[in-house]
Image: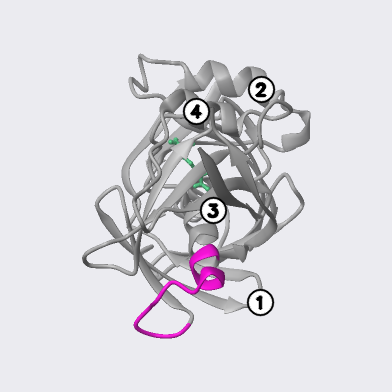
């Protein structure tokens, strides 16, 4: 079977995106894992099928690089919207798209060339004052589960080693978690490194992680305004904005098509 795909980058978080509006493509977990594996496959942090939706402009089916369905992916959502925009997916209003993912509705706008703003769900399940692996950890679910850890110098942290130890701590997180190391760089900006569940390594950016880091930074009074600039590992910047009560959260940043191609699945 030959499949056409686009490879997109959302601030360095990269995805294989496939137009499956005809519902003709069925991929197994090992096939998705093989496609996402770097060097021997296309290589990506995740794979997204864009499928029809009854209530929205499209459905985003997101799989982590391990081939299993993931929870919400913020950068994947932004990339899926940019893909839909470029692919000519019909929407009620030009440049505005709604999509469903994991049974939730999301709205987004292409605000500029290669820039997408995504409206996120309210953050929930806050957990404070956890000590894990010697780190003071805070937890929040922003569509995906995230631990947030503050450090004076995130570049001094062994994210691979510490990230995996916290991610696999089933006493605290039976379902696993993503792990974010955050450095406050000004009263309105932070720097972020994320170890991603399902990719099982540090990625160059994580959208729901950026939201988690910004919300927890604001909740703990480490940053002041309701808009936070988040510099991610790739060097790109994501912007997280929210209302005074930390609702109406948006995630804005770059999304671009890196290349388009086709691949034969045995
Ligand atoms: N990279 C994604 C997060 C994917 C979540 C996934 N790693 C999981 O925990 O299922 C983002 O931009 O929000």
Q: Which residues are magenta?
A: 83-94
Kindly identify the residue that appears in the image at 39 percent across and 76 percent down: 90
Image coordinates of residue 171 in percent, x first then y, are: 35, 14
Proximity of marks 3 and 1: CB atoms separated by less than 8 Å: no
Q: Earlier in the sequence, mark 3 or mark 1?
A: 3
Kindly identify the residue that appears in the image at 53 percent across and 40 percent down: 46
Q: Earlier in the sequence, mark 2 or mark 4?
A: 4
Residue 143 seen in render: yes
In the image, the residue with mark 4 has its CB under 8 Å from the nearest atom of ligand 1: no
Image disc number at residue 63 = none
In the image, the residue with mark 3 has its CB under 8 Å from the nearest atom of ligand 1: yes
Q: Specify the color scheme.
A: one colour
Image coordinates of residue 81 in percent, x first then y, are: 49, 65
Badge 1 marks a residue whose secondary structure is loop
In the picture of the structure, the residue carrying the numbered disc 1 is: 113
In the picture of the structure, the residue carrying the numbered disc 4 is: 31
Closer to the camera in the image, 103 or 204: 103
In the picture of the structure, the residue carrying the numbered disc 2 is: 160
- Residue 157, by quadrant, is top right
């Amino acid at each position: 079977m030959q499949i056409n795909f686009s490879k997109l980058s959302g601030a360095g978080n990269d995805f294989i995106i496939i137009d499956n509006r005809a519902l003709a493509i069925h991929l197994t977990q090992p096939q998705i894992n093989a496609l996402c594996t770097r060097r021997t496959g296309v290589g990506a942090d995740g794979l997204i099928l864009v499928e029809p939706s009854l209530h929205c402009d499209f459905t985003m089916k997101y799989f982590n690089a391990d081939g299993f369905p993931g929870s919400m992916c913020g950068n994947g959502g932004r990339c899926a919207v940019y893909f839909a925009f470029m692919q000519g997916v019909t929407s009620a209003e030009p440049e505005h798209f709604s999509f469903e993912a994991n049974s939730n509705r999301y709205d987004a706008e292409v605000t500029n060339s290669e820039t997408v703003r995504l409206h996120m769900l309210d953050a929930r399940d806050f957990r404070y004052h956890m000590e894990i692996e010697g780190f003071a950890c805070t937890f929040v679910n922003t569509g995906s589960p995230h631990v947030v850890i503050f450090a004076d110098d995130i570049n001094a942290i062994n994210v691979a080693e510490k990230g995996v130890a916290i991610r696999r701590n089933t006493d605290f997180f039976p379902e696993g978690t993503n792990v974010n190391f955050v450095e406050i760089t000004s009263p309105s900006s932070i720097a972020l490194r994320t170890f991603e569940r399902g990719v099982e390594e540090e990625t160059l950016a994580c959208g729901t992680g950026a939201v988690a880091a910004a919300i927890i930074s604001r909740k703990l009074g480490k940053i002041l305004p309701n808009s936070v600039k988040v510099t991610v590992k790739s060097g790109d910047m994501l912007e997280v904005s929210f209302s005074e009560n930390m609702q109406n959260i948006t995630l804005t940043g770059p999304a671009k098509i890196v290349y388009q191609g086709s691949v034969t699945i045995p």
